[in-house]
Amino acid sequence: MIRALGVPLLRQIGLICAIVIAVFLLIRVVPGDVVDVMATEGDMTAAEVAELRAELGLDRPVPEQLALWLTRMAQGDLGMSLRFERPVAQMIEYAIPTTLALAAKSLAIGLLLGVGIASAATIWPRGPAAWLVDFVNLWSIAIPTFCVGLAAILVFAIGLGWMKVLGNGFVPAIVIGIDIAGQIVKPLHEELKEASAAPYVRAAKARGESPARIVLAHLLPNAAPVAIALSGLILAGLIGGTLTMEVLFGLPGLGTLALQAIQGRDYPVIQAAILLFAVAIILVNAATDLLQRLLDPRLRR
Amino acid sequence: MTQDFGRRTFFGGAAALAAAGLLDHVPGTRLGTANAQTARTGTLKIALLGLDTSDPHRHTGSISVQQVYAEALTSIADDGKAIPYLAESWTISPDGKVYTFKIRQGVKFHNGRELTAADVKANAERVRDLRRGWLAAPMQLVSGFAAPDARTFVMEMKEPYGPLLNVLSELWIVAPESPGWAATVQTPIATGPFKFGTWVPNERLLAPAHDAYWQAGLPKVAAVEFNLRDTVDYTLALRAGDLHIARATADQIPVLKADPNIELQFMKDTSWIFWSFNNRKPRAPFDNVKVREAIAYAMDKPALLKVWSGDTGVATNQMAAPGNFYWDEALHKADKHAKPDRAKALAMLKAEGVDPSRTPLRIVSWQNDYSQACAQTMRELGFQVEHLALDDIGAQRRLGQYDWDLAPFGSGPRADIFLRFVRLLSDGPNTGLWGSPQDAAFDDLVKKAVAAVDLGQRRALYLQAWRHAMDNYWTVVIGHSAEAIANRRDVSGWTPGFTWGSARVDGGAGYASLIRGS
């Protein structure tokens, strides 16, 4: 088991390193650096620009900058923001709770809706839930979260005055949650339908168990590995969704931080944020793998 | 020459008017018992520009936020002139080299200590030694500072420097005991109507009211909160009631105008819109002034201006807008390019032996509709257009490479006309947008204008320099437009100023109040 997990884990760590180095190099290919930002805004002469670039170490060869950054990283030092002269760790620490809270709420809503609709559609195959499976699925495929968020602002915040825009953490979670639900509801429903024909379900029916109990007590636990296998979809929805919703609703999370750092060419902040995203994806993948092995004995063989 | 707003004279005449309550908006007349004011209520929520640093002396374009906590010796009035602020008056020696400022009495820092001339001197010295920001150039011309007594600050220049009073409106006075003074000020202790408060970069600055503010009755709200997020569409938040004041782009104006809860106001100085040729390393045939002139004939100013600013712009051919002291009506009326003349453009190109269809033309610009329209104009002339539409920073870097031919851009308000002319000087700052002409004659005219003590003579020299720039077709001006700032109608007393600054001696955030219930 340890060997089975260890090898992929090593592979994932290698992947993190590759991503981080690629980001380090790619962001330097993008024209302009933080000194250009300051020069644009502050009317600096060519001499002042050169002086500041040297002061920040941006005039050194890229491999030297990379080596320096990796050395600091190995010591757990994420560096200082070039633009704000603040520790990057402090900025990341401030942004994480917002993103985590939004992701957790979105995930809870998404799972609740997705599992709930799929279960209801299995229990009552001719009821409105069966129609909802297709509706929510089509919704998530056809309508980008950005459009849904914008429409929510125009209708509920500006039109009806029911909610605020800036810092609103609830509506974005619903928007992302519906998107996640739409992505998992269809495969989950198919899995539940297929499992309904299994001998243990027929046995449960023979025992006179209610359809609801059959779904909740027998089908869902057996469909759990499928739901976990969908975590890739969920994670993609979460990362994309939180980024757009943070920007649209002015939430000070990791997505906003990364985007503003890219706009301002704040290299240490961009690198740290991407590193964090990469680590999060690797960790979720590893956890998914582990859970699947625990829940499905066939994978342990 | 003297320019003395003597305190006794000023307040002598002001007393009767003050009694009648007519001086609420006259700078400095609110000085009195600082705490004698009505209860402050509400938090004014503003979104204009960002804040890059907590150190006012290191500011690099963070020119809209720090005015609420830090003040300067002078303030810019709506007509662009410097008026008394922390300096209640000043005199200038006849040779234009010695500026003597009388520091306002009774001004308290946020820590309760009274402002003295020694504080002003310490700030001026720090800015000079930092050698960064917009004040770097004039500070190089300073031969000495002095604070002979607690209320007198003297600034001696090596040569006369006309824009000094205006650029001093951005020399922020901070108490030297502010944490970080030796390196980067972390928590500026200053004299503004609001205190620095809590700053979260890229997110917000919460600035609570300064209870001992020197202008009695101000500020009128309990706090001001700046939204510093670069990425959010502020006008949505404004319409939803999350913000009270926000900047608006030209394309947002029609929607805001239709909203009964929103009032639109405009900044007093304008942005100027232009296209520039690469003057540092011009490629053939654009090194030929006749070719540049021909291209200018193809330019449809009214149409391009409409693309840039909707219906809010005014076409002209100068870096100063109509109505400005430095704008010249005769020059405006003589504009050869007020209307497009494509036939003439093509004929001139032919006369110069230029076949546009065989001539590559590289345009560097921001990603906006205006630059697309300019590129299309060039395509219609027949040029082989390569259009590099980049983000702000990418464009900045590319401009500095001088491997392009045409650059359509715009530039925002400045505290003094010199801060526009300086961009065309051979050793000027951030010259890429204007193609960096290296021209000794132009430099000389601008330097003479700066050194001119007489205002009329200064204006004449600036105009002469601008005519020289126009004759060489370095930069062709399309026109001007004022930045729109929208506020909800439940905000009272707020008016935008000459530049982006959110507070000034005679207006801004300190004067704004919220109608109860908002």
Image (cartoon, coloured by chain):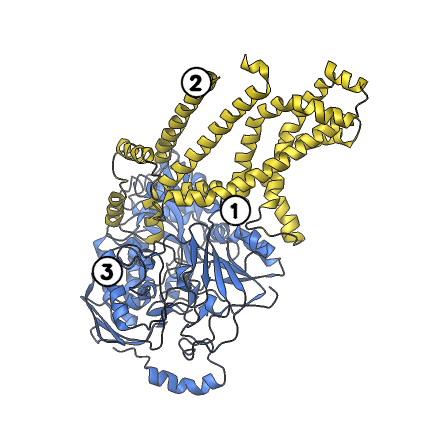
Residue in the picture at 44% in, 39% down? B379
On the question of residue A142 being in view, the answer is: no
Hey, what amino acid is under mark 1?
Leu
Mark 3 and mark 2: span between their CA atoms? 60 Å
Disc 3: which chain? B
Dot 1 falls on a residue whose secondary structure is loop
Residue under circle 3? B128
Judge left or right: residue B127 versus residue A296: left
Residue under circle 1? A251
On the question of residue B252 being in view, the answer is: yes
Hey, what amino acid is under mark 3?
Arg
Colour seen for chain B: blue
Residue under circle 2? A7
- Density class for disc 3 (Cα within 10 Å; few <14, some 14-19, many ≥20) is many
Residue A261, given in percent of the width and then of the height, sits at 41, 42
Do labels 3 and 2 touch, CB within 8 Å?
no
